[in-house]
Image (cartoon, rainbow, N blue to C red):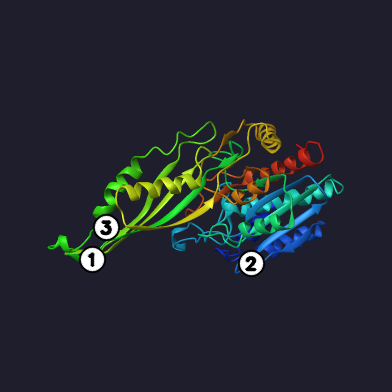
Amino acid sequence: MSDVLELARDLIRRRSVTPEDAGCLPLVGGRLARAGFAIEYLRHGEVDNLWATHGASSPTLIFLGHTDVVPSGPEAAWQSPPFEPTVRDGRLYGRGTADMKGSVAAMVVALEQFAAAHPDHRGRVGLLLTSDEEGPTNLDGVRKVAERFRATGERIDWCVVGEPSAKETLGDLIRVGRRGSLSGTLVVRGVQGHVAYPEKASNPIHAFAPALAELAATRWDEGNADFPPTSFQVSNLNAGTGANNVIPGELTALINFRYGTASRADDLRARTEAILQRHGVDFALDWNLSGEPFLTPPGGVLREVVVAVCRELCGIDPEQSTGGGTSDGRFIAPLGAEVVELGPVNASIHKVDECVALDELELLPRLYRAVCERLLTGTRSG
Protein backbone atom coordinates (compact mmCIF):
# COMPACT_ATOMS: atom_id res chain seq x y z
CA MET A 1 0.00 0.00 0.00
CA SER A 2 1.36 3.44 -0.94
CA ASP A 3 2.12 6.10 1.66
CA VAL A 4 -0.62 8.44 0.46
CA LEU A 5 -3.29 5.73 0.39
CA GLU A 6 -2.31 4.42 3.82
CA LEU A 7 -2.40 7.89 5.37
CA ALA A 8 -5.69 8.77 3.67
CA ARG A 9 -7.24 5.61 5.08
CA ASP A 10 -5.94 6.40 8.57
CA LEU A 11 -7.46 9.88 8.40
CA ILE A 12 -10.83 8.69 7.05
CA ARG A 13 -11.22 6.21 9.92
CA ARG A 14 -11.29 9.11 12.35
CA ARG A 15 -14.83 10.54 12.77
CA SER A 16 -13.74 14.15 12.61
CA VAL A 17 -17.13 15.76 12.10
CA THR A 18 -16.90 19.54 12.54
CA PRO A 19 -15.40 20.80 14.83
CA GLU A 20 -13.95 17.54 16.14
CA ASP A 21 -10.46 16.60 14.93
CA ALA A 22 -10.60 13.04 16.34
CA GLY A 23 -6.81 12.74 16.39
CA CYS A 24 -6.10 13.68 12.77
CA LEU A 25 -3.83 16.62 13.60
CA PRO A 26 -1.60 14.71 16.07
CA LEU A 27 -1.26 11.99 13.44
CA VAL A 28 -0.12 14.51 10.84
CA GLY A 29 1.96 16.51 13.30
CA GLY A 30 3.82 13.42 14.48
CA ARG A 31 4.75 12.46 10.93
CA LEU A 32 5.94 15.94 10.00
CA ALA A 33 7.91 16.31 13.25
CA ARG A 34 9.82 13.16 12.33
CA ALA A 35 10.48 14.73 8.94
CA GLY A 36 12.13 17.74 10.59
CA PHE A 37 9.21 20.19 10.69
CA ALA A 38 8.62 22.57 13.57
CA ILE A 39 5.12 21.88 14.95
CA GLU A 40 2.67 24.18 16.73
CA TYR A 41 -0.81 23.17 17.87
CA LEU A 42 -3.03 26.23 18.02
CA ARG A 43 -6.28 25.53 19.84
CA HIS A 44 -8.98 28.18 19.87
CA GLY A 45 -12.25 27.37 21.62
CA GLU A 46 -13.23 23.86 20.55
CA VAL A 47 -11.16 24.02 17.36
CA ASP A 48 -7.75 22.45 16.78
CA ASN A 49 -5.30 23.96 14.29
CA LEU A 50 -1.87 22.74 13.21
CA TRP A 51 0.97 24.92 11.94
CA ALA A 52 4.00 22.99 10.66
CA THR A 53 7.02 24.65 9.01
CA HIS A 54 10.34 23.59 7.51
CA GLY A 55 13.13 26.03 6.70
CA ALA A 56 13.63 29.67 7.56
CA SER A 57 13.33 33.18 6.16
CA SER A 58 11.45 33.95 2.97
CA PRO A 59 9.78 33.30 0.63
CA THR A 60 7.13 31.19 2.35
CA LEU A 61 4.96 28.62 0.59
CA ILE A 62 2.17 26.99 2.59
CA PHE A 63 -0.35 24.27 1.94
CA LEU A 64 -3.78 24.81 3.49
CA GLY A 65 -6.39 22.21 4.36
CA HIS A 66 -8.87 20.89 6.89
CA THR A 67 -9.37 17.62 8.72
CA ASP A 68 -13.05 18.09 9.60
CA VAL A 69 -15.82 16.58 7.49
CA VAL A 70 -19.57 17.01 7.16
CA PRO A 71 -21.88 14.39 8.72
CA SER A 72 -22.31 11.20 6.73
CA GLY A 73 -26.11 11.18 6.80
CA PRO A 74 -27.83 7.77 7.14
CA GLU A 75 -25.01 5.25 7.15
CA ALA A 76 -27.34 2.60 5.75
CA ALA A 77 -27.48 4.62 2.52
CA TRP A 78 -23.76 4.05 1.92
CA GLN A 79 -22.54 1.00 0.02
CA SER A 80 -19.78 0.69 2.64
CA PRO A 81 -19.49 2.34 6.07
CA PRO A 82 -18.57 6.03 5.63
CA PHE A 83 -15.80 5.95 8.22
CA GLU A 84 -14.36 2.61 7.10
CA PRO A 85 -12.26 3.46 4.01
CA THR A 86 -13.00 0.96 1.27
CA VAL A 87 -11.30 0.42 -2.08
CA ARG A 88 -13.40 -0.88 -4.97
CA ASP A 89 -13.43 -0.37 -8.71
CA GLY A 90 -10.32 1.82 -8.64
CA ARG A 91 -11.69 4.28 -6.08
CA LEU A 92 -11.29 4.97 -2.38
CA TYR A 93 -14.67 5.44 -0.68
CA GLY A 94 -15.40 7.13 2.64
CA ARG A 95 -16.43 10.44 4.16
CA GLY A 96 -13.71 13.00 3.47
CA THR A 97 -11.92 11.15 0.68
CA ALA A 98 -12.35 14.13 -1.65
CA ASP A 99 -13.16 16.88 0.85
CA MET A 100 -10.45 16.82 1.90
CA LYS A 101 -8.54 14.08 3.64
CA GLY A 102 -7.18 12.79 0.35
CA SER A 103 -5.59 16.19 -0.27
CA VAL A 104 -4.30 16.37 3.31
CA ALA A 105 -2.63 12.98 2.94
CA ALA A 106 -1.12 14.07 -0.38
CA MET A 107 0.20 17.30 1.14
CA VAL A 108 1.83 15.47 4.03
CA VAL A 109 3.50 12.89 1.79
CA ALA A 110 4.66 15.61 -0.64
CA LEU A 111 6.15 17.66 2.20
CA GLU A 112 7.92 14.64 3.70
CA GLN A 113 9.45 13.81 0.33
CA PHE A 114 10.38 17.40 -0.41
CA ALA A 115 12.10 17.96 2.95
CA ALA A 116 14.04 14.70 2.61
CA ALA A 117 15.19 15.49 -0.93
CA HIS A 118 15.92 19.18 -0.29
CA PRO A 119 16.82 19.65 3.39
CA ASP A 120 18.52 22.98 2.65
CA HIS A 121 15.89 24.46 0.33
CA ARG A 122 15.53 28.21 0.19
CA GLY A 123 12.80 29.93 2.15
CA ARG A 124 10.15 28.10 4.12
CA VAL A 125 7.46 25.54 3.40
CA GLY A 126 4.53 24.96 5.71
CA LEU A 127 1.25 23.21 6.32
CA LEU A 128 -1.74 24.84 7.99
CA LEU A 129 -4.64 22.58 8.95
CA THR A 130 -7.85 23.25 10.87
CA SER A 131 -10.69 21.16 12.26
CA ASP A 132 -13.30 23.86 11.56
CA GLU A 133 -13.72 24.55 7.85
CA GLU A 134 -17.08 22.90 7.30
CA GLY A 135 -18.77 24.66 10.22
CA PRO A 136 -21.21 27.56 9.84
CA THR A 137 -19.01 30.28 11.36
CA ASN A 138 -15.33 29.25 11.02
CA LEU A 139 -14.57 31.60 13.90
CA ASP A 140 -11.78 29.62 15.56
CA GLY A 141 -10.12 27.96 12.58
CA VAL A 142 -8.03 29.55 9.85
CA ARG A 143 -9.75 32.89 10.46
CA LYS A 144 -8.32 32.97 14.00
CA VAL A 145 -4.91 31.72 12.90
CA ALA A 146 -4.76 34.41 10.20
CA GLU A 147 -5.49 37.04 12.85
CA ARG A 148 -2.57 35.67 14.85
CA PHE A 149 -0.32 35.74 11.79
CA ARG A 150 -1.26 39.36 11.12
CA ALA A 151 -0.54 40.35 14.72
CA THR A 152 2.87 38.62 14.75
CA GLY A 153 3.90 39.79 11.29
CA GLU A 154 3.92 36.30 9.81
CA ARG A 155 4.43 36.64 6.04
CA ILE A 156 3.01 34.17 3.54
CA ASP A 157 3.92 34.56 -0.12
CA TRP A 158 2.13 31.60 -1.71
CA CYS A 159 -0.72 29.38 -0.53
CA VAL A 160 -1.95 26.17 -2.19
CA VAL A 161 -5.39 25.12 -0.94
CA GLY A 162 -6.25 21.44 -1.30
CA GLU A 163 -9.99 21.89 -1.83
CA PRO A 164 -11.49 19.54 -4.46
CA SER A 165 -11.28 21.81 -7.49
CA ALA A 166 -11.36 19.46 -10.50
CA LYS A 167 -14.48 18.85 -12.59
CA GLU A 168 -13.88 15.50 -14.33
CA THR A 169 -10.20 14.68 -13.89
CA LEU A 170 -7.37 15.90 -11.69
CA GLY A 171 -5.84 19.10 -13.01
CA ASP A 172 -8.63 20.11 -15.38
CA LEU A 173 -9.60 23.13 -13.22
CA ILE A 174 -7.85 25.23 -10.62
CA ARG A 175 -9.31 28.05 -8.55
CA VAL A 176 -7.37 31.30 -8.85
CA GLY A 177 -9.80 33.30 -6.73
CA ARG A 178 -13.16 33.18 -5.03
CA ARG A 179 -16.14 35.46 -4.73
CA GLY A 180 -16.90 37.22 -1.47
CA SER A 181 -19.89 36.15 0.62
CA LEU A 182 -22.06 38.70 2.43
CA SER A 183 -25.06 37.37 4.38
CA GLY A 184 -27.83 39.15 6.22
CA THR A 185 -30.55 38.24 8.68
CA LEU A 186 -33.45 40.55 7.92
CA VAL A 187 -36.32 41.02 10.37
CA VAL A 188 -39.36 42.89 9.02
CA ARG A 189 -41.58 44.18 11.82
CA GLY A 190 -45.35 44.30 11.55
CA VAL A 191 -48.32 44.18 13.89
CA GLN A 192 -50.06 40.87 14.55
CA GLY A 193 -53.82 40.76 14.20
CA HIS A 194 -56.91 39.00 12.89
CA VAL A 195 -57.10 38.55 9.12
CA ALA A 196 -60.69 39.83 9.23
CA TYR A 197 -59.52 43.16 10.64
CA PRO A 198 -56.46 44.13 8.55
CA GLU A 199 -56.92 47.79 9.45
CA LYS A 200 -55.92 46.87 13.01
CA ALA A 201 -52.75 45.03 11.96
CA SER A 202 -49.73 45.51 9.72
CA ASN A 203 -48.69 42.55 7.58
CA PRO A 204 -44.87 42.32 7.25
CA ILE A 205 -45.22 39.94 4.29
CA HIS A 206 -47.15 42.52 2.32
CA ALA A 207 -44.73 45.26 3.36
CA PHE A 208 -41.68 43.24 2.28
CA ALA A 209 -43.03 41.90 -1.02
CA PRO A 210 -42.43 45.02 -3.17
CA ALA A 211 -38.96 45.50 -1.72
CA LEU A 212 -38.12 41.84 -2.33
CA ALA A 213 -39.22 42.17 -5.94
CA GLU A 214 -36.84 45.09 -6.42
CA LEU A 215 -33.99 43.35 -4.61
CA ALA A 216 -34.38 40.27 -6.79
CA ALA A 217 -34.58 42.31 -10.00
CA THR A 218 -31.65 44.63 -9.24
CA ARG A 219 -28.53 44.35 -11.38
CA TRP A 220 -25.93 44.93 -8.70
CA ASP A 221 -22.97 45.13 -11.09
CA GLU A 222 -21.85 43.80 -14.46
CA GLY A 223 -19.02 41.65 -13.15
CA ASN A 224 -15.63 41.89 -14.86
CA ALA A 225 -13.07 39.76 -16.65
CA ASP A 226 -12.36 37.77 -13.49
CA PHE A 227 -15.78 37.45 -11.82
CA PRO A 228 -19.42 37.08 -12.92
CA PRO A 229 -22.04 39.67 -11.89
CA THR A 230 -23.04 39.76 -8.24
CA SER A 231 -25.75 37.29 -7.23
CA PHE A 232 -28.48 38.08 -4.66
CA GLN A 233 -30.44 35.21 -3.15
CA VAL A 234 -33.01 34.65 -0.40
CA SER A 235 -32.27 31.29 1.20
CA ASN A 236 -34.95 31.28 3.92
CA LEU A 237 -38.22 33.15 4.44
CA ASN A 238 -40.32 32.75 7.55
CA ALA A 239 -43.49 34.34 8.88
CA GLY A 240 -46.76 33.35 10.47
CA THR A 241 -48.06 31.39 13.41
CA GLY A 242 -49.34 28.43 11.42
CA ALA A 243 -52.92 29.65 11.70
CA ASN A 244 -54.70 30.88 8.58
CA ASN A 245 -56.63 33.58 10.42
CA VAL A 246 -53.68 35.43 12.00
CA ILE A 247 -51.70 38.21 10.35
CA PRO A 248 -48.09 37.66 11.44
CA GLY A 249 -46.30 40.25 13.48
CA GLU A 250 -42.85 39.55 12.07
CA LEU A 251 -41.05 38.16 9.03
CA THR A 252 -37.50 36.83 8.96
CA ALA A 253 -35.50 36.44 5.74
CA LEU A 254 -31.96 35.12 5.27
CA ILE A 255 -30.26 36.80 2.33
CA ASN A 256 -26.87 36.36 0.66
CA PHE A 257 -24.69 38.15 -1.86
CA ARG A 258 -21.92 36.38 -3.78
CA TYR A 259 -19.84 39.12 -5.30
CA GLY A 260 -16.57 39.74 -7.08
CA THR A 261 -14.23 42.68 -7.27
CA ALA A 262 -16.75 44.82 -9.21
CA SER A 263 -18.62 45.53 -5.95
CA ARG A 264 -17.76 46.29 -2.34
CA ALA A 265 -19.53 44.85 0.69
CA ASP A 266 -20.25 48.30 2.13
CA ASP A 267 -21.97 49.37 -1.10
CA LEU A 268 -24.11 46.22 -1.21
CA ARG A 269 -25.20 46.80 2.37
CA ALA A 270 -26.05 50.45 1.72
CA ARG A 271 -27.98 49.75 -1.49
CA THR A 272 -29.99 46.96 0.16
CA GLU A 273 -30.99 49.13 3.10
CA ALA A 274 -31.85 52.01 0.78
CA ILE A 275 -34.28 49.79 -1.15
CA LEU A 276 -35.95 48.65 2.06
CA GLN A 277 -36.27 52.22 3.30
CA ARG A 278 -37.65 53.45 -0.02
CA HIS A 279 -40.46 50.92 0.27
CA GLY A 280 -41.22 51.98 3.83
CA VAL A 281 -40.23 48.65 5.39
CA ASP A 282 -39.82 48.66 9.18
CA PHE A 283 -36.79 46.41 9.52
CA ALA A 284 -33.68 45.35 11.40
CA LEU A 285 -30.81 43.86 9.39
CA ASP A 286 -27.85 42.02 10.90
CA TRP A 287 -24.98 41.59 8.41
CA ASN A 288 -22.23 38.95 8.38
CA LEU A 289 -19.28 39.25 5.99
CA SER A 290 -17.93 35.73 5.63
CA GLY A 291 -15.10 36.78 3.35
CA GLU A 292 -14.03 39.32 0.77
CA PRO A 293 -13.35 38.27 -2.82
CA PHE A 294 -9.75 37.44 -3.65
CA LEU A 295 -7.85 36.90 -6.89
CA THR A 296 -4.39 35.75 -7.87
CA PRO A 297 -4.07 37.65 -11.15
CA PRO A 298 -2.66 36.37 -14.43
CA GLY A 299 1.09 36.47 -14.27
CA GLY A 300 1.16 35.67 -10.56
CA VAL A 301 4.11 33.42 -9.77
CA LEU A 302 2.06 30.73 -8.00
CA ARG A 303 -0.66 30.73 -10.65
CA GLU A 304 1.88 30.24 -13.42
CA VAL A 305 3.66 27.45 -11.53
CA VAL A 306 0.45 25.52 -10.80
CA VAL A 307 -0.68 25.82 -14.42
CA ALA A 308 2.72 24.53 -15.60
CA VAL A 309 2.61 21.60 -13.14
CA CYS A 310 -0.87 20.57 -14.33
CA ARG A 311 0.22 20.74 -17.95
CA GLU A 312 3.35 18.69 -17.38
CA LEU A 313 2.14 16.06 -14.91
CA CYS A 314 -1.55 15.79 -15.81
CA GLY A 315 -1.26 16.55 -19.52
CA ILE A 316 -4.01 19.17 -19.18
CA ASP A 317 -4.21 22.91 -19.70
CA PRO A 318 -6.34 23.71 -16.64
CA GLU A 319 -9.31 26.03 -16.64
CA GLN A 320 -8.51 28.94 -14.33
CA SER A 321 -11.70 29.72 -12.44
CA THR A 322 -13.04 31.98 -9.69
CA GLY A 323 -16.34 30.10 -9.41
CA GLY A 324 -17.81 27.99 -6.65
CA GLY A 325 -18.37 28.84 -3.03
CA THR A 326 -15.83 30.04 -0.49
CA SER A 327 -12.72 28.44 0.97
CA ASP A 328 -10.33 29.15 3.81
CA GLY A 329 -8.10 30.79 1.24
CA ARG A 330 -10.18 33.93 1.87
CA PHE A 331 -8.44 34.35 5.22
CA ILE A 332 -4.91 33.90 3.84
CA ALA A 333 -5.19 36.11 0.75
CA PRO A 334 -5.56 39.36 2.80
CA LEU A 335 -2.15 38.63 4.34
CA GLY A 336 -0.68 39.40 0.91
CA ALA A 337 -0.43 35.82 -0.34
CA GLU A 338 -1.09 34.54 -3.81
CA VAL A 339 -3.69 31.76 -3.40
CA VAL A 340 -4.47 28.91 -5.80
CA GLU A 341 -6.70 25.89 -5.14
CA LEU A 342 -5.63 22.53 -6.56
CA GLY A 343 -7.31 19.31 -5.54
CA PRO A 344 -9.24 16.22 -6.67
CA VAL A 345 -12.55 15.92 -8.49
CA ASN A 346 -15.41 17.45 -6.50
CA ALA A 347 -18.28 15.45 -8.00
CA SER A 348 -18.96 13.39 -4.85
CA ILE A 349 -18.23 15.84 -2.04
CA HIS A 350 -20.81 16.00 0.78
CA LYS A 351 -22.67 13.11 -0.89
CA VAL A 352 -23.35 9.51 0.00
CA ASP A 353 -20.49 7.28 -1.24
CA GLU A 354 -17.97 10.12 -1.44
CA CYS A 355 -14.88 8.88 -3.26
CA VAL A 356 -11.63 9.70 -5.00
CA ALA A 357 -9.97 7.85 -7.88
CA LEU A 358 -6.90 5.92 -6.73
CA ASP A 359 -4.76 6.97 -9.69
CA GLU A 360 -5.51 10.63 -8.99
CA LEU A 361 -4.83 10.20 -5.27
CA GLU A 362 -1.43 8.73 -6.17
CA LEU A 363 -0.66 11.61 -8.57
CA LEU A 364 -1.64 14.41 -6.19
CA PRO A 365 1.55 14.26 -4.00
CA ARG A 366 3.63 14.59 -7.16
CA LEU A 367 1.76 17.76 -8.08
CA TYR A 368 2.23 19.29 -4.64
CA ARG A 369 5.92 18.31 -4.49
CA ALA A 370 6.49 19.75 -7.96
CA VAL A 371 5.02 23.08 -6.81
CA CYS A 372 7.44 23.08 -3.86
CA GLU A 373 10.43 22.33 -6.04
CA ARG A 374 9.67 24.93 -8.68
CA LEU A 375 9.15 27.66 -6.08
CA LEU A 376 11.77 26.79 -3.47
CA THR A 377 14.57 25.05 -5.40
CA GLY A 378 14.11 26.07 -9.04
CA THR A 379 14.20 22.39 -10.05
CA ARG A 380 11.56 20.12 -11.53
CA SER A 381 10.39 16.65 -10.51
CA GLY A 382 8.40 14.40 -12.78
Mark with earlier residue (3, 1): 1
Q: Quadrant of residue 241?
A: bottom left
The disc at residue 192 is 1
Mark with earlier residue (1, 2): 2
The quadrant of the picture occupied by the C terminus is top right
247, above or below 341, in the image: below
- Label 3, label 1: how many angstroms apart (C-alpha)? 9 Å
**Toward the viewer: 256 or 131?**
256
**Which residue carries the number 2 mark?**
44
Q: Residue at x 30, y 44 (%)?
A: 213
Q: Secondary structure at mark 1?
A: loop
**Toward the viewer: 310 or 257?**
257
Q: Secondary structure at mark 2?
A: loop
Q: Position of residue 304 (x, y in %)?
A: 68, 33
**Toward the viewer: 26 or 271?**
271
Q: Residue at x 70, y 58 (%)?
A: 151
Type of residue at label 3? Pro
Q: Secondary structure at mark 3?
A: helix
Can the viewer see residue 230 in this picture? yes
Task: Sort mark 1 into few (<14), some (14-19) or many (20+) by Cα contacts within 10 Å.
Answer: some
Q: Position of residue 118 (x, y in %)?
A: 84, 46
Mark with earlier residue (2, 3): 2
Q: Residue at x 51, y 32 (%)?
A: 224
**Which residue carries the number 3 mark?**
204
Type of residue at label 2? His
Type of residue at label 1? Gln
